Amino acid sequence: MINLKKITKKGKALFLAYDQGLEHGPSDFNDKNVDPNYIIEIAKKGGYTGVVFQKGIAEKYKSEIKKSKVSLILKLNGKTNLVKGDPISRQLCTVKEAIKLGAGAVGYTIYIGSKHESIMFKEFENIQREARKKGLPVIAWIYPRGKSIKSKSSRELMAYAARTGLEIGADIIKIKYNGKIADLKWAVKNAGKTRVIIAGGVKKNERELLRQVREIVDAGAIGLAIGRNIWQNKKPLEITKKIKKVIWG
């Protein structure tokens, strides 16, 4: 039985995502949030249920993460945004390494619809099998991508992403919200007993962000994995407090 209590609180979740340095390059950062210590401090003071890092940061800042007592969610694969065409994100870290680094869960991205999806499915299968042996929760980032999905609706793709997570055995699925609550409710139903969290996405104004958080909770998702809308904010702890109030009441 997989125990999600290390990365959730009362069945809900709020993860501070900081894997953008690899995925987007340094364009998201300023002089303050470029420092992982700043992110760790937000995660600690904000009471996040998890913080998402790639292997390198988890290694270099291991002692700081441990002192923060915020659960580490270690991303096991990644890519840059410099290569064009159908995306593929290959494994960069093992479950064994994640455990040594003190991870409370591991994450892996699959781009469904990409011509390379079978490679990512195979890697996920191996990761999930190893994580199961250790009782470690597996979070699947599932994003529809590639030339083949252009004729599909956002409702269909969001539901397909959620259903894929259930079918491959993810404990939690991270998907992107298309802004339509009826579509998200349908996606959550497709996920069955697999929990759903929503990606924070691009920077939004506070009113729009909190409105979406309310819709996410009302649709049945357990929370968010949010990054830029927090650590690009001038008052990250204040916006965190408002988001937590919506999620936990």
Image (cartoon, rainbow, N blue to C red):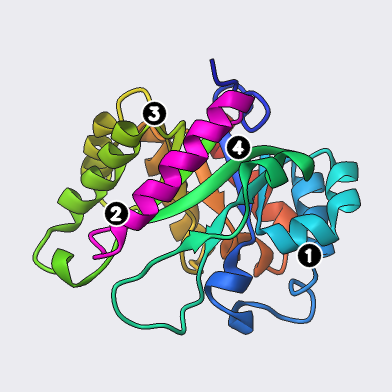
Which residue bears the numbered disc 4?
A: 245
Amino acid carrying label 1: it is Pro
Q: Mark 1 or 4, which is nearer the eye?
A: 1
Residue under pointer 3: 194
Residue 118: mark: 2
Instruction: Specify whether residue 129 is painted magenta.
Output: yes
* Identity of the residue furthest to the top in this view: 1
Give the mark nearer the N terminus: 4 vs 2.
Answer: 2
Quadrant housing the N terminus: top right
Q: How far apart are marks 2 and 1 (CA)?
A: 33 Å
Mark 1 and mark 4 in contact? Answer it, CB < 8 Å. no
Farthest residue to the left: give it: 151
Residue drawn where x is 8% and y is 66% of the image: 151
What are the residue bounds of the magenta stretch? 112-137
Looking at the rendered structure, the kind of residue marked 2 is Ser
On the question of residue 71 being in view, the answer is no
When the figure is inspected, residue 2 is found, relative to residue 186, above or below; the finding is above
Identify the residue at horizontal 29%, vertical 33% (top origin): 167
Camera-nearest label, 4 or 2: 2
**Which label sits in the foreground, 2 or 3?**
2
Image coordinates for residue 237, horizontal then vertical, percent: 74, 53
Task: Classify 10 Å Cα crowding around label 4: few (below 14), some (14-19), many (20 and above).
Answer: few
Tell me the distance, in whole angstroms, between the alpha carbons under discs 1 and 3.
30 Å
The quarter in which the C terminus is drawn is top right
Residue 198 coordinates in the image, percent (x, y): 44, 47
Does 218 sit left or right of 155 as displayed?
Answer: right
Q: Do the residues labelled 2 and 3 touch (CB within 8 Å)?
A: no
Q: Earlier in the sequence, mark 1 or mark 3?
A: 1
Toward the viewer: 211 or 4? Answer: 4
Please tell me whether mark 1 sits on a helix, a strand or a loop.
helix
In the rendering, which numbered label is found on residue 36? Answer: 1
